[in-house]
Amino acid sequence: EASRGPAKVGYTACVDAAEYDGDLARAVAALTIPDLDDKTPPVAVAHMSPDRYNQLTRRKNLAFGVMIAVSAILGMASFASAVAMLRRGRQGKEVAARDVTAKPSESANV
């Protein structure tokens, strides 16, 4: 019988575009795939200009600002709706209580 052992997955690696100048054999030779038991995460550096970084930062901050504003507006609308419902409920009970009159009981007159 064949049994299957536990599958292990480690970090992967790709050929650096700067090292691949059309010479695949040299690029593959430069490629180092980390050991399966190596637990140190690979370092990945994102290269971008300061202008591009500032542009992306502004876009991110704008998106989060819009989400916070929409959430705040929905929260205030929900609160206002709850207050309006509570006020309507109280007014309805007060009107109903004012309309009630006591009838004299027949046993009291006898």
Image (cartoon, grey):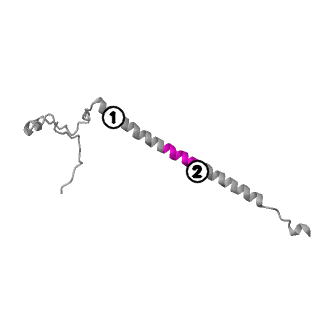
Could you tell me how far apart the alpha carbons at marks 1 and 2 are, in whole angstroms?
A: 39 Å
* Magenta-span inclusion, residue 78: yes
- Magenta: main secondary structure equals helix
Q: What element carries label 1?
A: helix
Which of the pair 20/64 is nearer the observer?
Answer: 64
> Please, what is the three-letter code of the amino acid marked with disc 1?
Gln
Residue 54 in the image: state x and y as whole percent.
Answer: 34, 32
State left or right for residue 31 relative to residue 45: left
- Compared to 88, does 108 lie above or below? below
Query: Magenta span covers which residues?
Result: 71-80
The structure residue drawn at horizontal position 17% and vertical position 38%, both measured from the top left corner, is: 33
Farthest residue, direction top: 50
Residue 17 figure quarter: top left
Residue pointed to by mark 2: 81
Residue shown at 57% from the left, 47% from the top: 79
Nearer to the camera, 40 or 31? 31
Asked which quadrant contains residue 31, the reply is: top left
- 99 falls in the magenta region: no
Q: Which mark is residue 55?
A: 1
Between 76 and 15, which is closer to the camera in this rendering?
76
**Nearest to N terminus: mark 1 or mark 2:** 1
Q: Position of residue 48 (x, y in %)?
A: 26, 32
Type of amino acid under label 2: Ser
The front one of 6 and 100 is 100
